[in-house]
């Protein structure tokens, strides 16, 4: 495989709230007020027609009605505007053109209005509209949605609600050298993927830190890319001419920690032990990236503190001769900072927080494309992923249903966990499109909301719908106005079985 480059009345209004499942600092914590410089925005996270436009943004100024559907300016009413997505890059905003939608989507499919506490979505067209998984909105209904929610039109389009500044601030990263093409999943010059404000802020912070001389502490959950961030600091720094020295403190046996860091003479402290230069001496003139700093014993943290305080002076084990190393220390931890000596933390002047996927959900489809691309470049994985490659769009085919789930999932292992979900889908997907399979569903952690429609469905209505659709769960769910997975939950609750036709076996119940 080649390298892929009418408004409803108040009694019909529902409010969808996003559960607070984020860690402190996440932009989906609804208790945090929007800043005056930001506004609600819908990010395109899934598109069957134009996947190359994933990452573009519909900016929604307050109290201004916008229409989403098949583009036709003559379909607008006075005071309305067509919602046309833009590509946001630091200091620049580019308009590519209207959304491309299939013929079964109405010209006036959705009407959007940004209010104080969220965005009101009014369904005017006949195509199926769903908020998250739990709420199907037929024509004539509306809902007030809040950041963290998704809106899907059939299996054609998925939008993620967040907040965005009108213009992204300028960054220090060199455009020509460091920026990749918009969207897709191609990494930039430092291996980073994404178009969210969080990832652009990280790029800016790393570029600033790289141009300084002080030592650095990278903090963030597991799987957020701290090693990649350390490599970026080195690559953008004046020390880039020498090889970055990397090691994880967690990988060094406790009895060898001191020798690995500072070196030792031959036969010391044990007979037969070879001489070591040590990581600090090896990093002379360069950068030492020491991962898992929180696993270092307190006494070794104290010795490391002395090296930093004394201009790089240290002694190898078994030797009285002083050594000097001109090195820059970049460390990382996913542990509580209390595990690091406070005076050592004080010497790590730059503290950079690496955002989790939960803090930049709109980037998840782009990161997923990058992971699939990397798989396609490995000979052992290529045959398994190449069937999902679309030559026309030069993207991997990912269903809107799976995309919605990946964007809403609560990640604890971040990129590693996203890759596991993709692998589960690759294994079980029967078509040429990555699907939300049974195995994927079993791994998902989604914010659960009961809806009026689901809770009022009785077993008789479920039986009737299944009978009308010859046991096809997906078709019965559409008839009942709930998601396939809501119907599966209710079938299990009421112990309802069905005899599915062979064509429905791939539905994933």
Image (spheres, rainbow, N blue to C red):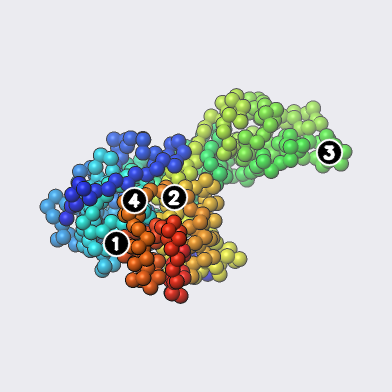
Is residue 41 depicted above or below 384 in this figure?
above
First reached walking from the N terminus: tag 1 or tag 3: 1
Label 4 CA crowd tier, 10 Å (few <14, some 14–19, many 20+): some
Q: Which residue is identified by label 1? A: 128
First reached walking from the N terminus: tag 1 or tag 2: 1
Q: Quote the CA–CA distance across marks 1 and 2.
A: 22 Å
**Closer to the camera, 483 or 331?**
483
Residue 266, label in figure: 3
Q: Quote the CA–CA distance across marks 2 and 4.
A: 15 Å
Q: Give the number of the mark in front: 3 or 2.
A: 2
Q: Residue at x 60, y 24 (%)?
A: 343
Q: Quote the CA–CA distance across marks 4 and 1.
A: 17 Å
Q: Which residue is identified by label 4? A: 451
Q: Quote the CA–CA distance across marks 1 and 3.
A: 73 Å
Which x, y percent locates residue 131? 33, 53
Q: Are marks 3 and 2 in contact (CB under 8 Å)?
A: no
Which x, y percent locates residue 438? 49, 62
First reached walking from the N terminus: tag 2 or tag 4: 2
Q: Are marks 3 and 4 in contact (CB under 8 Å)?
A: no
Which x, y percent locates residue 22? 44, 41
Q: Give the number of the mark in front: 2 or 4.
A: 4
First reached walking from the N terminus: tag 3 or tag 4: 3
Which x, y percent locates residue 404? 40, 56
Q: Which residue is identified by label 2? A: 446
Q: Residue at x 48, y 57 (%)?
A: 441
Label 3 CA crowd tier, 10 Å (few <14, some 14–19, many 20+): some
Q: Residue at x 29, y 51 (%)?
A: 58
Q: Give the number of the mark in front: 3 or 4.
A: 4
């Amino acid at each position: 495989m080649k390298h892929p480059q009418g408004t409803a009345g108040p009694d019909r209004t529902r409010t969808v709230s996003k559960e607070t499942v984020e860690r402190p600092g996440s932009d989906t914590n609804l208790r945090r007020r929007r800043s005056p410089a930001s506004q609600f925005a819908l990010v395109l996270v899934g598109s069957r027609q134009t996947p190359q436009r994933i990452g573009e943004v519909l900016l929604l100024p307050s109290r201004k009605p916008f229409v989403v559907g098949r583009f036709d300016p003559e379909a607008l009413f006075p005071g309305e505007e067509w919602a046309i997505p833009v590509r946001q890059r630091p200091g620049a905003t580019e308009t590519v053109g209207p959304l491309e939608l299939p013929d079964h989507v109405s010209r006036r499919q959705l009407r959007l209005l940004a209010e104080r506490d969220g965005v009101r979505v009014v369904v005017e067209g006949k195509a199926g509209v769903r908020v998250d998984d739990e709420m199907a909105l037929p024509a004539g209904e509306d809902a007030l949605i809040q950041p963290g929610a998704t809106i899907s039109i059939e299996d054609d389009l998925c939008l993620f609600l967040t907040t965005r500044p009108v213009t992204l601030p300028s960054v220090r990263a060199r455009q020509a050298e460091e920026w990749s093409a918009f969207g897709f999943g191609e990494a930039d010059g430092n291996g980073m993927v994404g178009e969210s404000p969080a990832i652009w802020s990280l790029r800016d912070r790393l570029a600033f830190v790289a141009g300084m001389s002080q030592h650095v502490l990278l903090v963030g959950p597991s799987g957020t890319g701290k090693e990649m961030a350390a490599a970026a600091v080195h690559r953008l720094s004046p020390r880039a001419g020498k090889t970055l020295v990397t090691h994880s403190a967690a990988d060094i046996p406790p009895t060898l920690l001191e020798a690995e860091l500072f070196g030792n003479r031959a036969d010391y402290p044990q007979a037969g032990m070879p001489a070591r230069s040590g990581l600090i001496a090896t990093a002379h003139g360069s950068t030492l990236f020491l991962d898992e700093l929180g696993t270092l014993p307190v006494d070794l943290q104290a010795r490391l503190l002395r090296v930093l305080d004394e201009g790089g002076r240290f002694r190898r084990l078994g030797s009285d001769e002083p050594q000097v190393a001109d090195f820059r220390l970049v460390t990382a931890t996913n542990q509580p900072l209390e595990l690091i000596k406070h005076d050592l933390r004080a010497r790590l002047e730059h503290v950079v927080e690496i955002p989790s996927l939960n803090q930049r959900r709109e980037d998840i489809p782009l990161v997923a494309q990058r992971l699939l691309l990397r798989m396609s470049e490995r000979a052992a994985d290529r045959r398994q992923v190449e069937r999902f490659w679309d030559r026309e769009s030069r993207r991997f085919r990912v269903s809107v249903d799976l995309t919605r789930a990946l964007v809403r999932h609560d990640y604890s292992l971040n990129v590693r966990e996203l890759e596991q979900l993709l692998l589960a889908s690759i294994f079980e997907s029967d078509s040429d499109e990555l699907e939300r399979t049974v195995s994927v569903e079993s791994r998902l952690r989604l914010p659960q909301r009961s809806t009026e429609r689901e809770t009022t469905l009785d077993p008789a209505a479920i039986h009737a719908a299944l009978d009308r659709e010859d046991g096809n769960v997906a078709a019965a769910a559409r008839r009942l106005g709930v998601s396939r997975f809501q119907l599966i939950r209710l079938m299990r609750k009421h112990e309802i079985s069905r005899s599915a036709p062979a064509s429905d076996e791939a539905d994933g119940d």
